[in-house]
Image: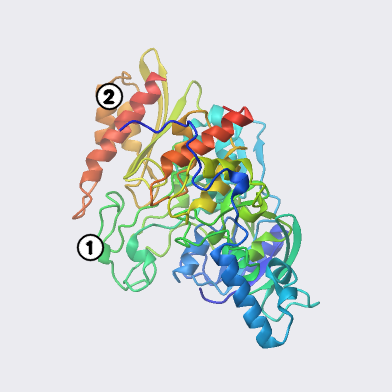
Protein backbone atom coordinates (compact mmCIF):
# COMPACT_ATOMS: atom_id res chain seq x y z
CA UNK A 1 0.00 0.00 0.00
CA UNK A 2 1.30 3.46 -0.90
CA UNK A 3 1.77 5.91 1.98
CA UNK A 4 -1.00 8.45 2.56
CA UNK A 5 -1.95 11.17 4.99
CA UNK A 6 -4.89 10.21 7.18
CA UNK A 7 -7.36 12.68 8.62
CA UNK A 8 -10.73 12.62 10.33
CA UNK A 9 -13.47 15.12 9.62
CA UNK A 10 -16.47 15.92 11.78
CA UNK A 11 -18.35 18.35 9.54
CA UNK A 12 -19.56 18.17 5.95
CA UNK A 13 -17.72 21.39 5.25
CA UNK A 14 -14.38 19.86 6.25
CA UNK A 15 -15.07 16.82 4.08
CA UNK A 16 -16.02 18.90 1.06
CA UNK A 17 -12.97 21.16 1.43
CA UNK A 18 -10.66 18.15 1.74
CA UNK A 19 -12.02 16.39 -1.33
CA UNK A 20 -12.14 19.62 -3.40
CA UNK A 21 -8.33 19.47 -3.38
CA UNK A 22 -8.44 16.27 -5.45
CA UNK A 23 -7.72 16.36 -9.17
CA UNK A 24 -10.65 14.05 -9.84
CA UNK A 25 -13.31 12.12 -7.97
CA UNK A 26 -12.87 9.22 -10.40
CA UNK A 27 -10.08 6.68 -10.91
CA UNK A 28 -6.77 8.08 -9.73
CA UNK A 29 -8.26 10.49 -7.19
CA UNK A 30 -5.67 12.11 -4.94
CA UNK A 31 -8.15 12.34 -2.09
CA UNK A 32 -10.49 9.57 -1.06
CA UNK A 33 -13.17 9.43 1.62
CA UNK A 34 -13.16 6.24 3.65
CA UNK A 35 -16.31 5.00 5.36
CA UNK A 36 -16.63 1.21 5.55
CA UNK A 37 -13.32 0.71 3.78
CA UNK A 38 -14.37 -2.65 2.35
CA UNK A 39 -13.71 -1.65 -1.25
CA UNK A 40 -11.21 1.20 -0.96
CA UNK A 41 -8.75 -0.53 1.36
CA UNK A 42 -8.92 -3.70 -0.71
CA UNK A 43 -8.03 -1.68 -3.83
CA UNK A 44 -5.33 0.27 -1.98
CA UNK A 45 -3.67 -3.02 -1.00
CA UNK A 46 -3.68 -3.94 -4.69
CA UNK A 47 -2.32 -0.49 -5.61
CA UNK A 48 -5.31 0.01 -7.87
CA UNK A 49 -6.12 3.00 -5.68
CA UNK A 50 -3.26 5.09 -4.32
CA UNK A 51 -4.68 8.30 -2.85
CA UNK A 52 -2.20 10.63 -1.15
CA UNK A 53 -4.89 11.58 1.31
CA UNK A 54 -7.53 9.43 3.00
CA UNK A 55 -10.29 11.28 4.81
CA UNK A 56 -12.29 9.37 7.41
CA UNK A 57 -15.93 10.49 7.20
CA UNK A 58 -17.31 7.99 9.70
CA UNK A 59 -17.92 10.73 12.26
CA UNK A 60 -20.27 12.76 10.06
CA UNK A 61 -23.90 12.65 11.25
CA UNK A 62 -25.17 10.74 8.19
CA UNK A 63 -26.14 7.38 9.68
CA UNK A 64 -29.91 7.86 10.02
CA UNK A 65 -32.84 6.54 8.01
CA UNK A 66 -35.57 9.15 7.99
CA UNK A 67 -39.20 8.91 6.89
CA UNK A 68 -40.07 11.88 4.66
CA UNK A 69 -43.37 13.79 5.01
CA UNK A 70 -44.45 12.56 1.55
CA UNK A 71 -43.91 8.94 2.63
CA UNK A 72 -40.53 8.45 0.94
CA UNK A 73 -37.36 7.42 2.73
CA UNK A 74 -34.16 9.43 3.19
CA UNK A 75 -31.16 7.20 3.82
CA UNK A 76 -27.95 8.66 5.23
CA UNK A 77 -24.80 7.90 3.25
CA UNK A 78 -23.22 6.27 6.32
CA UNK A 79 -26.09 3.88 7.05
CA UNK A 80 -24.48 0.44 7.05
CA UNK A 81 -25.77 -2.13 4.59
CA UNK A 82 -26.90 -4.45 7.40
CA UNK A 83 -28.83 -1.67 9.15
CA UNK A 84 -30.52 -0.65 5.92
CA UNK A 85 -31.42 -4.22 4.99
CA UNK A 86 -33.00 -4.82 8.39
CA UNK A 87 -34.72 -1.45 8.76
CA UNK A 88 -38.45 -2.12 9.29
CA UNK A 89 -39.58 0.49 6.73
CA UNK A 90 -37.20 -0.93 4.11
CA UNK A 91 -38.31 -4.50 4.75
CA UNK A 92 -41.96 -3.53 4.51
CA UNK A 93 -42.01 -0.98 1.68
CA UNK A 94 -38.86 -1.67 -0.32
CA UNK A 95 -38.34 -5.44 -0.07
CA UNK A 96 -36.24 -5.43 -3.24
CA UNK A 97 -33.66 -3.24 -1.52
CA UNK A 98 -33.53 -5.32 1.64
CA UNK A 99 -33.20 -8.53 -0.39
CA UNK A 100 -30.52 -7.06 -2.65
CA UNK A 101 -28.45 -5.89 0.31
CA UNK A 102 -28.73 -9.25 2.06
CA UNK A 103 -27.72 -11.02 -1.16
CA UNK A 104 -24.49 -9.02 -1.25
CA UNK A 105 -21.15 -9.86 0.36
CA UNK A 106 -21.07 -11.37 3.86
CA UNK A 107 -22.51 -10.41 7.24
CA UNK A 108 -19.16 -8.93 8.26
CA UNK A 109 -18.84 -6.82 5.12
CA UNK A 110 -22.47 -5.67 5.36
CA UNK A 111 -21.74 -4.45 8.89
CA UNK A 112 -18.97 -2.26 7.49
CA UNK A 113 -20.12 -1.21 4.01
CA UNK A 114 -22.17 1.97 3.75
CA UNK A 115 -24.91 3.21 1.44
CA UNK A 116 -22.65 5.88 -0.10
CA UNK A 117 -19.74 3.50 -0.46
CA UNK A 118 -21.87 0.82 -2.09
CA UNK A 119 -22.99 3.38 -4.69
CA UNK A 120 -19.33 3.92 -5.60
CA UNK A 121 -18.32 0.25 -5.53
CA UNK A 122 -15.75 -0.62 -8.21
CA UNK A 123 -15.85 -3.42 -10.73
CA UNK A 124 -14.52 -6.93 -10.01
CA UNK A 125 -13.00 -7.27 -13.51
CA UNK A 126 -9.76 -9.18 -12.89
CA UNK A 127 -7.77 -6.95 -15.25
CA UNK A 128 -8.88 -3.84 -13.39
CA UNK A 129 -7.72 -5.38 -10.11
CA UNK A 130 -4.35 -6.50 -11.49
CA UNK A 131 -1.93 -3.61 -11.93
CA UNK A 132 0.30 -5.76 -14.14
CA UNK A 133 -2.42 -5.84 -16.79
CA UNK A 134 -3.47 -3.05 -19.10
CA UNK A 135 -6.90 -1.62 -18.25
CA UNK A 136 -8.60 1.42 -19.78
CA UNK A 137 -10.54 2.01 -16.59
CA UNK A 138 -7.42 2.06 -14.43
CA UNK A 139 -4.97 3.49 -16.98
CA UNK A 140 -6.84 5.22 -19.80
CA UNK A 141 -5.50 4.27 -23.22
CA UNK A 142 -3.66 1.15 -22.07
CA UNK A 143 -6.17 -1.25 -23.62
CA UNK A 144 -8.75 -3.81 -22.54
CA UNK A 145 -7.44 -7.38 -22.36
CA UNK A 146 -10.84 -8.56 -21.11
CA UNK A 147 -12.38 -8.23 -24.56
CA UNK A 148 -10.12 -11.00 -25.84
CA UNK A 149 -9.49 -12.59 -22.47
CA UNK A 150 -11.27 -13.82 -19.36
CA UNK A 151 -14.68 -12.23 -19.70
CA UNK A 152 -17.04 -14.90 -18.39
CA UNK A 153 -18.32 -12.61 -15.62
CA UNK A 154 -18.30 -9.37 -17.60
CA UNK A 155 -20.94 -7.26 -19.28
CA UNK A 156 -23.30 -8.10 -22.13
CA UNK A 157 -25.08 -4.74 -21.95
CA UNK A 158 -23.60 -1.26 -22.24
CA UNK A 159 -20.08 -2.37 -23.15
CA UNK A 160 -17.84 -0.33 -25.43
CA UNK A 161 -14.70 -1.14 -27.40
CA UNK A 162 -12.77 0.23 -24.43
CA UNK A 163 -14.37 -1.52 -21.46
CA UNK A 164 -16.72 -4.41 -20.72
CA UNK A 165 -16.54 -4.31 -16.90
CA UNK A 166 -19.72 -4.84 -14.88
CA UNK A 167 -20.97 -2.77 -11.99
CA UNK A 168 -20.79 -5.32 -9.14
CA UNK A 169 -23.31 -3.86 -6.70
CA UNK A 170 -26.60 -5.51 -5.78
CA UNK A 171 -27.87 -2.45 -3.92
CA UNK A 172 -27.48 -0.26 -7.00
CA UNK A 173 -29.72 -2.55 -9.04
CA UNK A 174 -32.48 -2.26 -6.45
CA UNK A 175 -32.02 1.51 -6.32
CA UNK A 176 -32.38 1.64 -10.11
CA UNK A 177 -35.67 -0.24 -9.97
CA UNK A 178 -36.86 1.97 -7.11
CA UNK A 179 -35.95 5.16 -9.02
CA UNK A 180 -33.86 6.45 -6.15
CA UNK A 181 -32.07 9.81 -6.15
CA UNK A 182 -28.60 10.59 -4.87
CA UNK A 183 -28.16 13.76 -2.84
CA UNK A 184 -24.76 15.34 -3.27
CA UNK A 185 -23.38 18.28 -1.31
CA UNK A 186 -20.51 20.45 -2.52
CA UNK A 187 -19.33 24.04 -2.12
CA UNK A 188 -22.02 24.94 -4.67
CA UNK A 189 -24.76 23.62 -2.40
CA UNK A 190 -26.98 20.60 -2.89
CA UNK A 191 -27.85 18.74 -6.06
CA UNK A 192 -30.17 15.80 -6.52
CA UNK A 193 -29.10 13.28 -9.15
CA UNK A 194 -31.57 10.63 -10.33
CA UNK A 195 -29.95 7.19 -10.07
CA UNK A 196 -30.39 6.76 -13.84
CA UNK A 197 -28.03 9.72 -14.39
CA UNK A 198 -25.59 8.93 -11.59
CA UNK A 199 -23.81 6.05 -13.34
CA UNK A 200 -22.09 6.66 -16.69
CA UNK A 201 -21.63 4.28 -19.58
CA UNK A 202 -17.96 3.46 -20.23
CA UNK A 203 -17.86 4.79 -23.80
CA UNK A 204 -14.30 5.93 -24.48
CA UNK A 205 -13.77 7.14 -20.89
CA UNK A 206 -14.31 4.04 -18.71
CA UNK A 207 -12.21 5.69 -16.00
CA UNK A 208 -15.18 7.99 -15.41
CA UNK A 209 -17.89 5.94 -13.72
CA UNK A 210 -20.19 8.38 -11.96
CA UNK A 211 -21.35 11.98 -11.82
CA UNK A 212 -19.05 12.63 -8.85
CA UNK A 213 -16.77 15.67 -9.05
CA UNK A 214 -13.95 16.80 -6.73
CA UNK A 215 -15.52 18.37 -3.65
CA UNK A 216 -18.66 16.23 -3.90
CA UNK A 217 -19.96 14.43 -0.82
CA UNK A 218 -22.84 11.98 -1.12
CA UNK A 219 -25.00 12.73 1.92
CA UNK A 220 -28.18 10.73 1.29
CA UNK A 221 -30.08 8.43 -1.01
CA UNK A 222 -33.79 9.19 -1.31
CA UNK A 223 -36.41 6.59 -2.18
CA UNK A 224 -39.73 7.83 -3.55
CA UNK A 225 -43.03 6.57 -2.12
CA UNK A 226 -43.63 3.01 -3.32
CA UNK A 227 -46.05 2.81 -6.24
CA UNK A 228 -49.57 2.06 -5.03
CA UNK A 229 -50.24 -1.65 -4.68
CA UNK A 230 -46.77 -2.61 -5.85
CA UNK A 231 -44.59 -5.45 -4.61
CA UNK A 232 -40.92 -5.91 -5.24
CA UNK A 233 -38.32 -8.65 -5.32
CA UNK A 234 -34.61 -9.24 -5.98
CA UNK A 235 -33.35 -12.46 -7.52
CA UNK A 236 -29.61 -13.07 -7.74
CA UNK A 237 -27.95 -15.91 -9.65
CA UNK A 238 -24.31 -16.72 -9.02
CA UNK A 239 -21.66 -19.44 -9.08
CA UNK A 240 -22.27 -20.39 -5.45
CA UNK A 241 -25.26 -19.96 -3.15
CA UNK A 242 -23.84 -17.18 -0.98
CA UNK A 243 -21.02 -14.64 -0.71
CA UNK A 244 -20.49 -14.21 -4.44
CA UNK A 245 -21.08 -11.55 -7.04
CA UNK A 246 -23.98 -11.87 -9.45
CA UNK A 247 -23.68 -13.51 -12.84
CA UNK A 248 -27.16 -12.13 -13.40
CA UNK A 249 -29.69 -10.54 -11.09
CA UNK A 250 -33.06 -8.89 -11.41
CA UNK A 251 -34.74 -6.21 -9.32
CA UNK A 252 -38.42 -5.94 -10.11
CA UNK A 253 -41.27 -3.78 -8.85
CA UNK A 254 -44.71 -4.81 -10.02
CA UNK A 255 -48.32 -3.83 -9.43
CA UNK A 256 -51.14 -5.93 -10.85
CA UNK A 257 -54.74 -4.75 -11.12
CA UNK A 258 -57.54 -7.03 -12.37
CA UNK A 259 -54.95 -9.45 -13.66
CA UNK A 260 -53.12 -6.81 -15.66
CA UNK A 261 -49.80 -5.15 -14.96
CA UNK A 262 -50.40 -1.53 -13.94
CA UNK A 263 -46.90 -0.63 -12.82
CA UNK A 264 -43.54 -2.20 -13.65
CA UNK A 265 -39.91 -1.41 -12.99
CA UNK A 266 -37.18 -3.79 -14.06
CA UNK A 267 -33.43 -3.51 -13.50
CA UNK A 268 -30.64 -6.05 -13.92
CA UNK A 269 -27.30 -6.61 -12.24
CA UNK A 270 -24.21 -8.59 -13.19
CA UNK A 271 -24.84 -8.09 -16.89
CA UNK A 272 -24.41 -4.36 -17.46
CA UNK A 273 -21.60 -1.83 -17.31
CA UNK A 274 -23.87 0.07 -14.97
CA UNK A 275 -26.94 -0.97 -12.95
CA UNK A 276 -29.18 -1.76 -15.89
CA UNK A 277 -32.72 -0.40 -15.89
CA UNK A 278 -34.76 -1.79 -18.75
CA UNK A 279 -37.49 0.51 -20.13
CA UNK A 280 -37.97 -2.11 -22.89
CA UNK A 281 -39.01 -4.74 -20.35
CA UNK A 282 -41.26 -2.28 -18.55
CA UNK A 283 -42.98 -1.32 -21.79
CA UNK A 284 -43.56 -4.99 -22.57
CA UNK A 285 -45.29 -5.41 -19.20
CA UNK A 286 -47.56 -2.40 -18.82
CA UNK A 287 -51.20 -3.17 -19.57
CA UNK A 288 -50.51 -6.83 -20.29
CA UNK A 289 -51.94 -9.79 -18.40
CA UNK A 290 -49.69 -10.89 -15.55
CA UNK A 291 -48.86 -14.26 -17.07
CA UNK A 292 -45.69 -16.28 -17.67
CA UNK A 293 -45.98 -15.46 -21.37
CA UNK A 294 -45.90 -11.72 -20.67
CA UNK A 295 -43.00 -12.13 -18.28
CA UNK A 296 -41.04 -14.14 -20.85
CA UNK A 297 -41.65 -11.46 -23.49
CA UNK A 298 -40.54 -8.74 -21.08
CA UNK A 299 -37.39 -10.69 -20.27
CA UNK A 300 -36.63 -11.12 -23.95
CA UNK A 301 -37.08 -7.38 -24.45
CA UNK A 302 -34.73 -6.68 -21.55
CA UNK A 303 -31.88 -8.57 -23.23
CA UNK A 304 -32.67 -7.58 -26.80
CA UNK A 305 -29.61 -5.36 -27.22
CA UNK A 306 -27.27 -7.73 -25.35
CA UNK A 307 -23.98 -8.57 -27.03
CA UNK A 308 -21.96 -11.60 -26.00
CA UNK A 309 -18.18 -11.67 -25.59
CA UNK A 310 -16.18 -14.86 -26.10
CA UNK A 311 -17.03 -16.44 -22.72
CA UNK A 312 -20.15 -14.75 -21.39
CA UNK A 313 -22.87 -15.57 -23.91
CA UNK A 314 -24.57 -17.80 -21.34
CA UNK A 315 -25.40 -14.71 -19.33
CA UNK A 316 -27.93 -13.54 -21.88
CA UNK A 317 -30.15 -16.58 -21.40
CA UNK A 318 -29.40 -16.63 -17.67
CA UNK A 319 -30.47 -12.99 -17.26
CA UNK A 320 -33.58 -13.60 -19.37
CA UNK A 321 -34.69 -16.44 -17.12
CA UNK A 322 -33.73 -14.44 -14.05
CA UNK A 323 -36.00 -11.53 -15.04
CA UNK A 324 -38.89 -13.83 -15.98
CA UNK A 325 -38.56 -15.76 -12.72
CA UNK A 326 -38.36 -12.63 -10.56
CA UNK A 327 -41.49 -11.24 -12.23
CA UNK A 328 -43.37 -14.51 -11.72
CA UNK A 329 -42.33 -14.60 -8.07
CA UNK A 330 -43.48 -11.09 -7.32
CA UNK A 331 -46.73 -11.54 -9.24
CA UNK A 332 -47.52 -14.66 -7.21
CA UNK A 333 -46.67 -13.04 -3.86
CA UNK B 1 -24.44 -39.72 3.81
CA UNK B 2 -26.51 -38.84 6.82
CA UNK B 3 -25.92 -35.54 8.52
CA UNK B 4 -24.09 -35.72 11.76
CA UNK B 5 -26.45 -35.28 14.67
CA UNK B 6 -25.68 -32.72 17.29
CA UNK B 7 -25.48 -35.39 19.98
CA UNK B 8 -22.26 -34.52 21.74
CA UNK B 9 -19.35 -36.67 20.78
CA UNK B 10 -16.55 -37.05 23.31
CA UNK B 11 -14.37 -33.98 23.05
CA UNK B 12 -10.95 -34.81 21.65
CA UNK B 13 -8.96 -33.33 24.53
CA UNK B 14 -11.29 -34.02 27.44
CA UNK B 15 -13.90 -31.59 28.74
CA UNK B 16 -13.38 -27.96 27.74
CA UNK B 17 -12.45 -26.80 31.23
CA UNK B 18 -9.53 -29.17 31.18
CA UNK B 19 -8.08 -27.90 27.93
CA UNK B 20 -4.74 -26.35 28.73
CA UNK B 21 -4.04 -23.58 26.27
CA UNK B 22 -1.58 -21.73 28.42
CA UNK B 23 1.48 -23.30 26.92
CA UNK B 24 0.71 -23.27 23.23
CA UNK B 25 3.51 -23.50 20.71
CA UNK B 26 2.91 -19.89 19.75
CA UNK B 27 3.02 -18.50 23.26
CA UNK B 28 6.19 -20.46 23.86
CA UNK B 29 7.80 -19.08 20.72
CA UNK B 30 6.55 -15.61 21.51
CA UNK B 31 8.04 -15.71 24.97
CA UNK B 32 11.35 -16.84 23.55
CA UNK B 33 11.17 -14.16 20.87
CA UNK B 34 10.29 -11.33 23.20
CA UNK B 35 12.71 -12.34 25.90
CA UNK B 36 15.42 -12.86 23.34
CA UNK B 37 14.90 -9.45 21.78
CA UNK B 38 14.52 -7.79 25.14
CA UNK B 39 17.70 -9.33 26.48
CA UNK B 40 19.53 -7.94 23.51
CA UNK B 41 18.27 -4.50 24.40
CA UNK B 42 19.17 -4.87 28.03
CA UNK B 43 15.61 -4.87 29.36
CA UNK B 44 14.17 -7.37 31.79
CA UNK B 45 12.21 -9.86 29.73
CA UNK B 46 9.42 -10.24 32.28
CA UNK B 47 8.44 -6.59 32.05
CA UNK B 48 7.93 -6.86 28.32
CA UNK B 49 5.77 -9.92 28.12
CA UNK B 50 2.85 -9.86 25.77
CA UNK B 51 0.02 -7.40 25.86
CA UNK B 52 1.28 -5.11 28.60
CA UNK B 53 4.07 -3.96 26.34
CA UNK B 54 1.82 -3.46 23.38
CA UNK B 55 -0.86 -1.63 25.29
CA UNK B 56 1.76 0.91 26.33
CA UNK B 57 2.73 1.41 22.69
CA UNK B 58 1.92 5.11 22.74
CA UNK B 59 3.58 6.10 25.97
CA UNK B 60 5.24 9.13 24.36
CA UNK B 61 3.22 12.32 24.58
CA UNK B 62 3.28 13.15 20.87
CA UNK B 63 2.99 10.60 18.09
CA UNK B 64 5.95 10.30 15.71
CA UNK B 65 5.61 12.37 12.54
CA UNK B 66 3.32 10.83 9.96
CA UNK B 67 1.80 8.33 12.34
CA UNK B 68 -1.75 8.24 13.65
CA UNK B 69 -2.51 8.02 17.35
CA UNK B 70 -5.56 5.96 18.13
CA UNK B 71 -7.13 5.25 21.48
CA UNK B 72 -9.51 2.33 21.67
CA UNK B 73 -10.62 -0.34 24.08
CA UNK B 74 -9.33 -3.80 23.20
CA UNK B 75 -10.90 -6.65 25.14
CA UNK B 76 -11.88 -4.15 27.79
CA UNK B 77 -8.41 -2.65 28.17
CA UNK B 78 -7.95 1.03 27.19
CA UNK B 79 -5.24 0.98 24.56
CA UNK B 80 -3.35 3.73 22.81
CA UNK B 81 -1.42 3.06 19.63
CA UNK B 82 0.78 5.12 17.34
CA UNK B 83 0.64 3.53 13.92
CA UNK B 84 1.53 4.18 10.32
CA UNK B 85 -1.85 5.15 8.81
CA UNK B 86 -1.61 2.12 6.51
CA UNK B 87 -1.84 -0.28 9.45
CA UNK B 88 -4.97 -2.38 9.21
CA UNK B 89 -6.88 -3.28 12.34
CA UNK B 90 -5.77 -6.85 11.72
CA UNK B 91 -2.07 -5.96 11.66
CA UNK B 92 -2.52 -3.60 14.59
CA UNK B 93 -3.96 -6.39 16.70
CA UNK B 94 -1.46 -9.02 15.63
CA UNK B 95 1.77 -7.08 15.16
CA UNK B 96 1.40 -4.20 17.62
CA UNK B 97 -0.71 -5.74 20.36
CA UNK B 98 0.51 -9.32 19.83
CA UNK B 99 -3.07 -10.55 19.95
CA UNK B 100 -2.44 -13.31 17.46
CA UNK B 101 -5.73 -15.08 18.05
CA UNK B 102 -7.05 -13.06 15.10
CA UNK B 103 -5.77 -14.72 11.92
CA UNK B 104 -4.65 -13.33 8.58
CA UNK B 105 -6.02 -15.45 5.76
CA UNK B 106 -6.67 -13.77 2.42
CA UNK B 107 -6.17 -10.19 3.72
CA UNK B 108 -8.85 -9.06 1.22
CA UNK B 109 -12.16 -9.63 3.00
CA UNK B 110 -12.83 -12.92 1.26
CA UNK B 111 -12.22 -15.56 3.95
CA UNK B 112 -13.35 -14.23 7.35
CA UNK B 113 -10.33 -15.52 9.31
CA UNK B 114 -9.73 -11.99 10.65
CA UNK B 115 -13.25 -11.49 12.02
CA UNK B 116 -13.39 -9.40 15.19
CA UNK B 117 -16.25 -7.65 16.95
CA UNK B 118 -16.25 -3.85 16.86
CA UNK B 119 -18.83 -2.06 18.99
CA UNK B 120 -20.85 -5.28 19.16
CA UNK B 121 -20.74 -6.08 15.44
CA UNK B 122 -18.57 -8.51 13.54
CA UNK B 123 -16.29 -7.05 10.88
CA UNK B 124 -13.30 -8.06 8.74
CA UNK B 125 -10.28 -6.56 10.51
CA UNK B 126 -8.22 -6.78 7.32
CA UNK B 127 -10.32 -4.17 5.49
CA UNK B 128 -10.30 -1.58 8.22
CA UNK B 129 -7.53 0.78 9.30
CA UNK B 130 -6.57 1.12 12.96
CA UNK B 131 -6.86 4.85 12.43
CA UNK B 132 -10.60 4.44 11.74
CA UNK B 133 -11.23 3.02 15.22
CA UNK B 134 -10.72 5.96 17.53
CA UNK B 135 -12.91 5.38 20.59
CA UNK B 136 -14.12 1.97 19.41
CA UNK B 137 -14.49 -1.16 21.52
CA UNK B 138 -12.78 -4.13 19.91
CA UNK B 139 -13.27 -7.73 21.01
CA UNK B 140 -10.95 -10.44 19.75
CA UNK B 141 -10.90 -14.14 20.44
CA UNK B 142 -8.71 -13.46 23.47
CA UNK B 143 -11.53 -11.34 24.90
CA UNK B 144 -14.21 -14.04 24.72
CA UNK B 145 -12.89 -16.52 27.24
CA UNK B 146 -9.77 -17.86 28.82
CA UNK B 147 -8.40 -21.35 29.16
CA UNK B 148 -10.46 -22.89 31.92
CA UNK B 149 -13.33 -20.46 31.37
CA UNK B 150 -14.14 -20.67 27.69
CA UNK B 151 -17.10 -18.75 26.33
CA UNK B 152 -20.13 -20.93 25.51
CA UNK B 153 -19.31 -20.69 21.80
CA UNK B 154 -15.66 -21.60 22.30
CA UNK B 155 -16.68 -24.58 24.43
CA UNK B 156 -19.25 -25.68 21.85
CA UNK B 157 -16.62 -25.61 19.09
CA UNK B 158 -14.43 -27.89 21.20
CA UNK B 159 -17.33 -30.17 22.06
CA UNK B 160 -18.48 -30.51 18.45
CA UNK B 161 -15.01 -30.66 16.94
CA UNK B 162 -15.76 -27.56 14.87
CA UNK B 163 -12.38 -27.45 13.19
CA UNK B 164 -9.67 -29.51 11.64
CA UNK B 165 -6.54 -27.46 10.96
CA UNK B 166 -7.90 -24.64 13.14
CA UNK B 167 -6.76 -21.69 11.06
CA UNK B 168 -10.25 -20.34 10.40
CA UNK B 169 -11.52 -21.22 13.87
CA UNK B 170 -11.07 -17.94 15.71
CA UNK B 171 -12.81 -16.09 12.87
CA UNK B 172 -15.58 -18.69 12.90
CA UNK B 173 -16.03 -18.32 16.66
CA UNK B 174 -16.05 -14.52 16.50
CA UNK B 175 -18.62 -14.61 13.70
CA UNK B 176 -20.73 -17.19 15.50
CA UNK B 177 -20.61 -15.17 18.72
CA UNK B 178 -21.78 -11.99 16.99
CA UNK B 179 -24.46 -13.95 15.13
CA UNK B 180 -26.21 -14.65 18.45
CA UNK B 181 -27.27 -10.99 18.57
CA UNK B 182 -28.33 -10.73 14.92
CA UNK B 183 -31.73 -11.28 13.29
CA UNK B 184 -30.90 -14.77 12.00
CA UNK B 185 -33.68 -17.31 11.43
CA UNK B 186 -33.86 -20.56 13.41
CA UNK B 187 -33.05 -23.03 10.63
CA UNK B 188 -29.73 -24.61 9.75
CA UNK B 189 -29.95 -22.94 6.34
CA UNK B 190 -30.26 -19.54 8.03
CA UNK B 191 -27.10 -20.15 10.02
CA UNK B 192 -25.22 -21.40 6.97
CA UNK B 193 -26.15 -18.23 5.11
CA UNK B 194 -25.22 -16.02 8.08
CA UNK B 195 -21.85 -17.78 8.34
CA UNK B 196 -21.03 -17.66 4.62
CA UNK B 197 -18.40 -14.97 5.23
CA UNK B 198 -16.22 -17.50 7.04
CA UNK B 199 -14.55 -20.01 4.79
CA UNK B 200 -13.26 -23.34 6.16
CA UNK B 201 -11.17 -25.21 3.63
CA UNK B 202 -11.03 -28.33 5.79
CA UNK B 203 -14.80 -28.48 5.53
CA UNK B 204 -15.74 -28.54 9.22
CA UNK B 205 -18.97 -26.76 8.34
CA UNK B 206 -21.39 -29.39 9.67
CA UNK B 207 -19.67 -29.43 13.06
CA UNK B 208 -19.44 -25.64 13.17
CA UNK B 209 -23.16 -25.50 12.45
CA UNK B 210 -23.89 -28.02 15.22
CA UNK B 211 -21.86 -25.97 17.70
CA UNK B 212 -23.66 -22.75 16.83
CA UNK B 213 -27.12 -24.30 16.93
CA UNK B 214 -26.39 -25.85 20.31
CA UNK B 215 -25.40 -22.49 21.79
CA UNK B 216 -28.48 -20.86 20.27
CA UNK B 217 -30.75 -23.57 21.71
CA UNK B 218 -29.18 -23.22 25.14
CA UNK B 219 -29.65 -19.48 24.90
CA UNK B 220 -33.34 -20.02 24.15
CA UNK B 221 -33.06 -18.16 20.84
CA UNK B 222 -34.06 -21.02 18.55
Q: Residues at badges 1 and 2 in contact (C-beta under 8 Å)?
A: no
What residue do we see at 44% from left, 52% from top?
Answer: A199
Point out which mark residue A149 bears: 1
Point out which mark residue A294 bears: 2
Q: Chain of mark 2?
A: A
Are there few (<14), some (14-19), or many (20+) residues within 10 Å of tag 1?
few
What residue do we see at 37% from left, 32% from top?
Answer: B3
When asked about the image quadrant of residue A288, the answer is top left
When asked about the image quadrant of residue B183, the answer is top right
Q: Chain of mark 1?
A: A
Residue extending farthest right = B61
What residue do we see at 60% from left, 76% from top?
Answer: B33
Q: Nearer the viewer, residue A203 or B60?
A: B60
What residue do we see at 61% from left, 42% from top?
Answer: A75
**Coloring scheme used:** rainbow
Is any atom of residue A62 visible in this view?
yes
Q: Nearer the viewer, residue B6 or A109?
A: B6
Marks 1 and 2, how far apart at CA: 36 Å
Residue B97 x/y as whole percent:
66, 67
Residue A297 x/y as whole percent:
25, 29
Quadrant holding the C terminus of chain A: top left
Give the mark nearest the N terminus, 1 or 2. 1
Q: Secondary structure at mark 1?
A: loop
Amino acid sequence: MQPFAFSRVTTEQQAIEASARSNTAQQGAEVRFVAGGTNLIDLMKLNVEAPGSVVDINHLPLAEVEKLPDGGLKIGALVRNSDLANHPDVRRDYAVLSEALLAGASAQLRNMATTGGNLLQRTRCVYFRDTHSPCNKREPGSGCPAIEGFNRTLAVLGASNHCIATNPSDMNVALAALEASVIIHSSNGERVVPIADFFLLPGDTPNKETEMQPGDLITHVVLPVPASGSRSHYLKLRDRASYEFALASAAVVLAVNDGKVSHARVAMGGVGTRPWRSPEAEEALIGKPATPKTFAEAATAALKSAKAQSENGFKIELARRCVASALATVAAA
Amino acid sequence: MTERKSAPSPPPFGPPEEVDLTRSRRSFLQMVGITGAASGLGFGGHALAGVALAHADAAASTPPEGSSRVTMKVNGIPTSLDVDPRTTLLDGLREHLKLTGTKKGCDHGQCGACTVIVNGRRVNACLSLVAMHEGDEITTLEGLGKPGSLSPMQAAFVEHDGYQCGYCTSGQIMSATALLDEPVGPHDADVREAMSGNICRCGAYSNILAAIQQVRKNKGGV
